[in-house]
Image: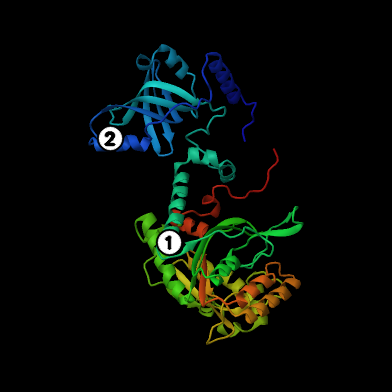
């Protein structure tokens, strides 16, 4: 961050004091905007794009460029809808006002009243009849030709990133459209949007290490949720057969290009459905949203073409490990053989991990990066799917899928386990894993088991990683590009 004693900042503060001495308000709040930049462009379009508009416009925004030519100047200002050129002449606004205008800087906010005309080069421009300072910027913007390129500074000072890099704003506009499209898709199909607790006495719904806090008044430990799953399924038990939440979840895990401790997830539940139904629904939803946002179902992500038209590929976990990961099928049921393979590949496996965990660790390293086209991976071991229904054909396997696109997991869904006896047994297995050092294992949730004893209809549920899907549709290489304020390590000034 720039030192407040820098010469440029000192000069700006002197200008501010000079303006105040002249009776100029530095931070007024009485300028009324009649048109945005987009409104002005629509006005131009309505008149055929070639007729000057003599109607008055009152517009406001931040000065982005400023070129002075003695008694006249061109500037560009930007509001939330776009950027427009303005032309300021001493003969139009008067000598006194022009003298004040000459003391303005790039970065200042201004209000301009004027009319539209076309310059000789054909650029539509606002001819200023009056100009006012709306906010004096005490610090200069980064130099425009080099802009703001350092990723660390961009994330820490996202406000500068948004000012200097218009493409960044486009990412977050796209993000908002993606989330709204998900919401519209589900609402049109009769789902109810709800909110569930972000602070929970027992964390559950995912294998993850939670953040822990303490509530002083109640004298109890609380956890930031790792997923909303168990609360949403309580609502299904309560009779809300179609329910969803677009939620913030928190996991005390490492930071990477695909992981941020605070992230956004869509989670939804559909009664009287199976994981097969959800795979069909997921194809339909993601294809619809891609078309809505991009205007096409084929796009490029990190120089790789992705086609969302179906049907999407389906592989079992075993097939994926063999065909894409090069794992000998004879090893799939051999825990010691899998451990030896992981060691030979440099894949760290925590001591005591069961076979299912080893398989998924191998999959993450050897297979996931290769799954570029939309692919459902199905048939996960029950021991790594503690909330999923057992397969009727293979009781050791769960009716579960994970969706991968662009080399990253996008969704996780399954037919829900609604047998309270089986669920309690699986929770106890998870508790045993936790006691053996697995910090990501589930806690025992007796109340959830009690809820299941009242009866939950056959149900299927799914979680979709919003941040990762936004990465795909905006061609972002890192999750930090699609989160406005990603978590960063503290720095000392």
Tell me the element at label 2: helix
In whole angstroms, how far apart are the C-alphas of marks 2 and 1?
37 Å
Residue 292 circle label: none
Q: Is residue 41 visible?
A: yes
Whether residues under marks 2 and 1 lie with C-beta atoms below 8 angstroms apart, the answer is no
How many callouts does the rendering have? 2
- Horizontally, residue 244 falls left or right of residue 426, namely left
Tell me the element at label 1: helix
> Could you say where residue 334 lies in the image, as x and y percent from the top left?
64, 84
Residue, disc 1: 187
Q: Of 477 and 415, which appears nearest the observer? A: 415
User: Which residue corresponds to the image point at 58% horizontal and 25% vertical from the top-left?
Assistant: 8
- Horizontally, residue 142 falls left or right of residue 358, namely left
> Could you say where residue 375 lies in the image, as x and y percent from the top left?
46, 71
User: Which residue corresponds to the image point at 36% horizontal and 67% vertical from the top-left?
Assistant: 309
> Could you say where residue 59 lies in the image, as x and y percent from the top left?
39, 30
Q: Of 122 and 150, which appears nearest the observer? A: 122
Return the disc, 2 or 1, that comes first in the chain's sequence. Answer: 2
What colour-coding does the image apply?
rainbow
Residue, disc 2: 44
Q: Of 70 and 169, which appears nearest the observer? A: 169
For the N terminus, the image quarter is: top right
Q: Is residue 307 visible?
A: no
């Amino acid at each position: 961050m720039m030192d407040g004693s820098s010469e440029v900042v000192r000069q700006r503060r002197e200008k501010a004091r000079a303006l105040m001495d002249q009776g100029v308000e530095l931070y007024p709040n009485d300028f009324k905007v009649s048109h945005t930049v987009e409104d002005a462009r629509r006005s131009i379009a309505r008149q055929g794009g070639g007729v000057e508009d003599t109607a008055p416009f009152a517009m406001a925004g931040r000065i982005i460029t400023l070129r002075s030519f003695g008694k006249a100047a061109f500037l560009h200002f930007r509001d939330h809808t776009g950027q427009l050129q303005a032309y300021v002449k001493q003969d139009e606004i008067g000598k006194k006002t022009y003298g004040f205008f000459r003391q303005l800087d790039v970065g200042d906010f201004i209000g301009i009243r004027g009319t539209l005309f076309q310059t000789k080069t054909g650029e539509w421009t606002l001819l200023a009849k009056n100009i006012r300072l709306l906010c004096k910027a005490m610090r200069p913007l980064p130099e425009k030709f080099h802009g703001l390129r350092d990723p660390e500074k961009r994330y820490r000072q996202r406000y500068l990133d948004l000012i200097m890099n218009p493409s960044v704003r486009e990412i977050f506009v796209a993000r908002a459209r993606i989330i709204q499209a998900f919401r519209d898709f589900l609402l049109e199909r009769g789902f109810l949007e709800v909110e569930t607790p972000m602070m929970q006495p027992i964390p559950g719904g995912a294998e993850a290490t939670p953040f822990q806090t303490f509530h002083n008044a109640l004298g109890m430990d609380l956890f930031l949720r790792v997923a909303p799953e168990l609360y949403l399924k309580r609502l299904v038990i309560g009779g809300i057969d179609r329910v969803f939440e677009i939620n913030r979840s928190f996991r005390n895990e490492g930071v990477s290009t695909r992981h941020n401790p605070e992230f956004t997830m869509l989670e939804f539940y559909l009664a009287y459905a199976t994981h097969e139904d959800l795979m069909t629904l997921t194809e339909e939803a993601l294809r619809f949203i891609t078309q809505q946002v991009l205007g096409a179902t084929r796009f490029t992500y990190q120089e790789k073409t992705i086609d969302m038209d179906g049907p999407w590929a389906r592989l079992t976990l075993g097939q994926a490990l063999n065909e894409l990961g090069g794992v000998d099928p004879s090893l799939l049921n051999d825990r010691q053989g899998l451990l030896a393979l992981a060691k030979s590949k440099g894949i760290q496996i925590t001591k005591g991990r069961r076979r299912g965990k080893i398989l998924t660790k191998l999959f993450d390293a050897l297979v996931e990066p290769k799954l570029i086209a939309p692919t459902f991976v199905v048939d996960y071991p029950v021991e790594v799917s503690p909330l999923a229904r057992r397969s009727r054909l293979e009781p050791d396997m769960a009716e579960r899928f994970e969706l991968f696109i662009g080399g990253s997991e996008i969704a996780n869904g399954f037919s829900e386990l609604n047998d309270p006896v089986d669920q309690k047994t699986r929770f106890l297995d998870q508790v045993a894993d936790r006691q053996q050092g697995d910090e990501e294992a589930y806690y025992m949730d007796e109340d959830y088991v009690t809820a299941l004893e009242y009866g939950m209809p056959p149900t299927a549920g799914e979680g979709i990683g919003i941040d990762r899907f936004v990465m795909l549709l905006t061609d972002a290489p890192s999750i930090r590009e699609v989160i406005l304020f990603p978590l960063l390590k503290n720095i000392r000034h």
